[in-house]
Image: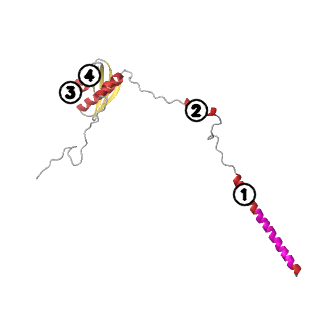
Amino acid sequence: MVDKVEKVEEKEVAKKAPAKKTTAKKATAKTEVKVETVKKPRSVKSEATAKPATLADAGLKVAKTAEKKPVEKKEKPVKDAQGRIYATGKRKTSIARVWIKAGKGSITVNGKDYESYFRRPILQMVINQPFGIAKREGAYDVVATIVGGGLSGQAGALKHGISKALALAEPELRSVIKQAGFLTRDSRVVERKHYGHKKARRSFQFSKR
């Protein structure tokens, strides 16, 4: 009986011993995995983002960027094929397209002479103001087409267009014309009608009874 008990104990010890070895192997495997994760190399930057190896390479890059030239803007020609200078003038709701050319001083508006188109002497004086200030009376021929507005607005638009065309024809006259205020577009326009009023400011007639 004693021998049987001893054999049973030896078997139990033998069974327990290899179990300890496997646990030890598992532990070593875990430690090895940990070591491997620690030893993994860090991510390396790509060659494109890497810094230049030498100062010469950096100099080459700077030279390449300096070689790029800005795009040159093409300036519009001042005169057309007939030697005329074009400008646009505006006043109120009128728009005047003006062409000027060296000549005897004739002014044509919508196919008519300006004196027959603008009958009022004040409007004729307004049109001739740019030539008077620049001292160029009778030096240029003017051809204009005007659209929109009344005679007063059309005369102001023509004056604005002639002033701009003169400044393009002779740039040295620009300061004189600008000081007179002829190059600035007159922004005054009729005020809109408001609610509760007959017009912009005019009220309806008030009745007491």
Residue 206, above or below 127: below
Decide which of 66, 185 is in the foreground and name it.
66
Q: Which residue is mark 1?
A: 33
Residue 138, above or below 67: above
Q: Which residue is mark 2?
A: 62
> Which residues, given as a range, are shown in magenta?
5-25
Mark 2 to mark 4: distance in Å?
A: 57 Å
Mark closer to the observer (2, 4): 2
Mark 2 to mark 3: distance in Å?
A: 66 Å
| Residue sticking out furthest to the top | 104
On the rendered structure, is 42 left or right of 201? Answer: right
Q: Which residue is mark 3?
A: 122
| Residue sticking out furthest to the front | 55
Secondary structure of the residue carrying tag 1 is helix
* Percent coordinates x, y for residue 83 in the rendering: 37, 20
Three-letter amino acid code of the residue under disc 4: Gly
Mark 3 to mark 4: distance in Å?
A: 14 Å
Secondary structure of the residue carrying tag 2 is helix
Instruction: Give whichever of discs 3 and 1 has the lower sequence position.
Output: 1
* Percent coordinates x, y for residue 152 in the rendering: 23, 31
Three-letter amino acid code of the residue under disc 1: Val
Instruction: Give whichever of discs 2 and 4 has the lower sequence position.
Output: 2
Circle 3 crowding by C-alpha within 10 Å: few under 14, some 14–19, many from 20: few
Q: Main secondary structure of the magenta part?
A: helix
Mark closer to the observer (4, 1): 1
Three-letter amino acid code of the residue under disc 3: Ile
Mark 1 to mark 2: distance in Å?
A: 48 Å
Q: Which residue is mark 4?
A: 132
